[in-house]
Amino acid sequence: MKLINFLEFEPLKEIMEKMKIDRNEKIEIDRIKKIEIARIWKDLSSLSGLDIDINETDSSEKGYIKYKEFDKLVAYIRDQKYFEGKFELKKFHIAYNCDTLKRSRKKDSSKYKIVQNKSPEFTINILSEDGKTVLESNVIRKLDVCINCLKALNYKNFLNVSSFERNRIRNNFSFEEFLGTEFDKNEELIKSYNLDDIENDKVRLYPKNWDEISNNYRKSKKWICEECGKDCSKNKSELEVHHIDHDPSNSKFYNLKALCRTCHSKIHPHMEE
């Protein structure tokens, strides 16, 4: 039986069009995979991290949190809110089988971000008690390590030492010590891909529902350009959506900006051609 030439497979071409990729473009499968991994690392290694459903992560051989090629990841809750009039920061997690994460996988698994860097600080949003109002956005806070994680990993023999020593281990938790060479290894991996110009690569990984996202965002801005104030409600195709970090795979509302074609072309001069 003759195998299908997937590079000329029409359904694949249709998928390419939906992803805003030229259907006649020569596909380099290995390069696409490298670009995807590099973009994941870009988010993981930032202070804010990568949005994730915690069920999509795996456990490494030693019980750490793993996602794709990346091991020893840290999970934390970005949107934190008041409870009974008080605000208390949630802990970050380093163990896949932590009791807290086990419970979260059953009911609220999508509230987490995963991150890997050497900083003890995280980017969070502080919400009202009902979760409907953002009181502070993108604020940097230092979080503490989850005790259940230290127990699950028996980190530094945590289960077998005195209460005093447990407090010392928890209070003096060091990301640099925890990560060891893992962060540097990942940095070297991405550098070895030689993708110096990822953001300008022809492969544009738009989400499958990009048209819906774009329409909803422009609608939320009442079809008005956020740069010059032009009203595009009578000619909606005149208003376009720009990705602030130039990464079309990151289509969260905070990364979008509604721009008329004129303002958009000033950011992307090639659009005038």
Image (tube, rainbow, N blue to C red):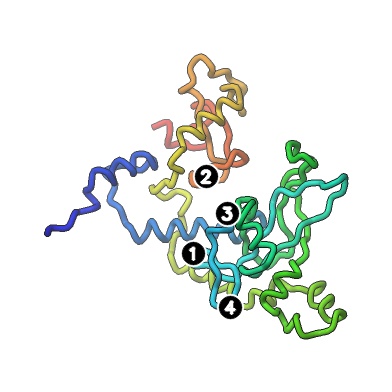
Please report whichever mark, 4 or 2, sits nearer to the chain's N-terminal start. Answer: 4
Q: Which residue is mark 4?
A: 62
Up-down: is 273 above or below 189?
above
Which residue is depicted at the point 53% across and 19% down? Answer: 232
Q: Secondary structure at mark 3?
A: strand
The answer to whether 169 appears left or right of 10 in the picture is: right
The answer to whether residue 99 is left or right of residue 219 is right
Q: Residue at x 75, y 37 (%)?
A: 133
**Real-space Cα separation, disc 4 to disc 3, in angstroms:** 21 Å
**Residue 213: which disc?**
none
> Looking at this view, is 60 or 181 the one in front?
60
Residue 187 is drawn in which quadrant? bottom right
Residue 52: mark? 3
Picture quarter with the C terminus: top left
What's the distance in space between the residues labelled 2 and 1, CA to CA?
23 Å
Quadrant showing the N terminus: bottom left
The residues tagged by marks 3 and 2 sit, at their Cα atoms, a distance apart of 20 Å
**Marks 4 and 3, the one that precedes in the sequence:** 3
Q: Where is residue 114 shown, x and y percent of the image? A: 61, 59
Amino acid type of disc 3?
Ile
Instruction: Report how far apart the C-alphas of labels 4 and 2 lie in the structure.
Output: 36 Å
Q: Residues within 10 Å of mark 4 (few under 14, many from 20)?
A: few
Label annotation for residue 68: 1
Percent x, y for residue 253? 59, 38
Between 194 and 234, which is closer to the camera in this rendering? 234
Earlier-in-chain disc, 2 versus 1? 1
Whether residues under marks 4 and 2 lie with C-beta atoms below 8 angstroms apart, the answer is no
Identified by mark 1, the residue type is: Lys
The residue that label 2 is drawn on is 246
The first of marks 3 and 2 along the sequence is 3
Residue type indicated by callout 4 = Lys
